[in-house]
Image (spheres, rainbow, N blue to C red):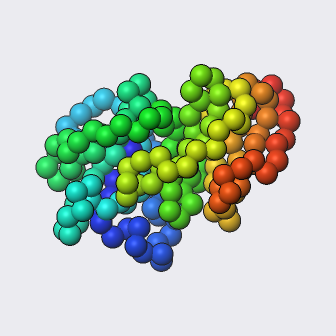
Amino acid sequence: MFVGGTDWLLSASLDRRAVLKGASSAALGLLASACGSSRPTSTAPVRSAAADGAAESRETAYVFNVGSKDVTLIDVANRQVRETRPLGASVRWLSNEQTYWDGARIWTYDFPDDQVQAIAIDPRQVAITRTIAGLGKGPGHSLVVLPDRKKAAINVAGDNLIAFLDLEHGSVDATLQTGAFP
């Protein structure tokens, strides 16, 4: 899940760490209290434009639903679900311990039919805009965008390897064999 207003994506001066901070259990507790729920959920903060394109700034919480492969947008101020949109993938893990933001998209992974793939989500569209498929046998456990924001590393646990991705070209640059189940 990520929380945001309308101007974050337009500001290049924000510190990436400050933006991504809060994906830990502290943000989980904040969301739960804001929504009046004690149910645990997975969180990751990112600011995004309002879903309806309104000019005013509105805080929006994005909750990724693994089982139904969709995302629920919540108006934080009103504590109401705005809408649920199909995503077509199960967002597995977004954490403040990982870097998953490339400056335009949120990178994560899925492993449909036990095949690992990297997916990029455009927070403005709330849609998958790029997929790098065929990385190997799943499951996967993490994808980390590297400091240059143009490359990423993803584990492919079923094939005991780490794949290094070229995010700009949507391809695999290299693989590194590891021990069992990285």
The residue shown at (28%, 45%) is 73
Count of numbered circles on the image: 0
Q: Quadrant of residue 43?
A: top left
The answer to whether residue 180 is left or right of residue 18 is right
Residue 118 visible in the snapshot: yes
- Quick one: 53 or 95, which is closer to the camera? 53
The residue shown at (56%, 34%) is 110
- Quick one: 20 or 51, which is closer to the camera? 51
> Is residue 18 placed above or below 12 in the rendered structure?
above
Quadrant assignment for the N terminus: top left
Q: Position of residue 2 (x, y in %)?
A: 38, 50
Quadrant assignment for the C terminus: top right
> Is residue 111 placed above or below 8 in the rendered structure?
above
> Is residue 112 placed above or below 70 in the rendered structure?
above
The answer to whether residue 142 is left or right of residue 74 is right
The answer to whether residue 137 is left or right of residue 3 is right
Residue 30 visible in the snapshot: no
The residue shown at (78%, 27%) is 159
Residue closest to the far bottom: 13
Q: Position of residue 106 (x, y in %)?
A: 51, 52
The residue shown at (73%, 31%) is 136
The answer to whether residue 70 is left or right of residue 179 is left
Q: Position of residue 118 (x, y in %)?
A: 61, 42
Residue closest to the far left: 78
